[in-house]
Amino acid sequence: MIPPVASQFVAGEEPATAFEHTRRANEDGVAVILNLLGEHYHERPPADADTAAYEQLVADLGETELDGCVSVKPSQLGLDVGPDVFRENYRRVVAAGDEHDVFVWCDMEDATTTDTTLDAFEELAHEFDGGVGLCVQANLRRTRADLERLVDVPGKIRLVKGAYDEGEEISYTEKAEVDEAYRENLTYLFKNRDEGIGVGSHDPEMIAYAQELQERHGGEFEVQMLMGVREDAQRRLAAEGHEVWQYAPYGAKWLSYFYRRVRERKENLTFAARAVLGV
Ligand code: FAD
């Protein structure tokens, strides 16, 4: 049972609670990206088990009227076991998504995984004609070059600031530099794409900048935020007519995810506690 303080950030432990959460978010005009919690498996059985769980999730989601999709993690699908295992399992989830008309995102993990993840995404994006999306991280110096490679690939791109601490030689480490890189990468996307741009940020300045870029260059974008973070803004943006997606994790492995949210921003704990206590 997930304690109320954590359930601000996690949509229960089972697909049924995740679907119920999705239904409620949809009522506010917010679509949901479901993520089964799990990562860094070093043996094949848990990676295969989560792959099978995603196949079932996608099949079940496809049967509903819910406005939802899924997002997988490379190390959850077996990247630490081997790149071939990841590619095979990723393909299985994407093929299920294709069969049941459910979009499949892929999160981006630490910089040692970027090349393998990009290669696998690019192959599937062509094969499944854009039914997939990939996250890229503005804190990595390489991302601008990666965007040049991805810009004509079908599918969607979610730009985030980046959640992993990387070395100075491969990443921007100052917040101001990361914000600047985010703006530059977003500008590049708007100048070179008409659709499939995901603004994965809670930062009001980045969202306002995306709106500015849309006015200047046209193009469609969606805002993506995490469950439990700025949900008032998610509802407001949706009411204003923006496409808003909420990334909602669920599953038994909720504790480490909750700690990560708290470490990232200590206020999260205060916000969550206030919401639970109604103060
Ligand atoms: P920050 O720089 O953290 O904050 C900027 C401003 O946003 C703050 O000053 C404040 O005004 C507002 N804000 C931020 N958090 C809060 C809060 N809790 N409450 C109120 N206001 C707040 N990272 C990866 O490396 N790989 C991924 O695959 C990945 N996927 C993601 C998917 C989604 C949908 C999202 C939203 C994030 C994802 N991330 C991922 C995390 C991302 O890289 C950042 O670590 C995280 O989003 C924090 O950066 P930020 O852009 O939200 O803004």
Image: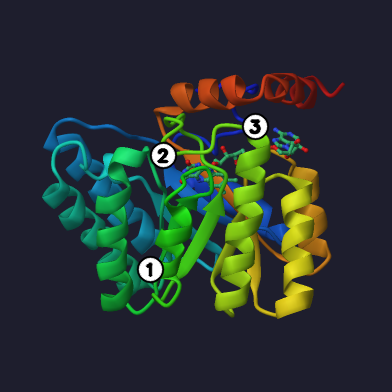
Q: Amino acid at mark 1?
A: Arg
| Whole-percent x, y for residue 220 in the image | 65, 75
**Which residue is drawn at the image coordinates 19% and 55% (left, top)?**
87
Q: Is residue 146 left or right of residue 33?
A: left
- Tell me the SS state at disc 1: helix
Residue at numbered disc 3: 8
- Tell me the SS state at disc 3: loop
Q: Is residue 17 visible?
A: no
Residue at numbered disc 1: 149
Label 2: few (<14), some (14–19) or many (≥20) C-alpha neighbours in 10 Å: few
For the residues marked 1 and 2, what is the alpha-carbon distance in whole angstroms? 18 Å
- Verify CB contact (< 8 Å) between mark 3 and mark 2: no
Label 1: few (<14), some (14–19) or many (≥20) C-alpha neighbours in 10 Å: few
For the residues marked 3 and 2, what is the alpha-carbon distance in whole angstroms? 34 Å
Question: Camera-side residue: 207 or 54?
Answer: 207
Q: Quadrant of residue 208?
A: bottom right
| Whole-percent x, y for residue 156 in the image | 48, 68
Q: Choose the circle earlier in sequence order: 1 or 3.
A: 3
- Tell me the SS state at disc 2: loop
Q: Is residue 178 visible?
A: yes
- Verify CB contact (< 8 Å) between mark 1 and mark 2: no
**Number of marks present in the image shown:** 3
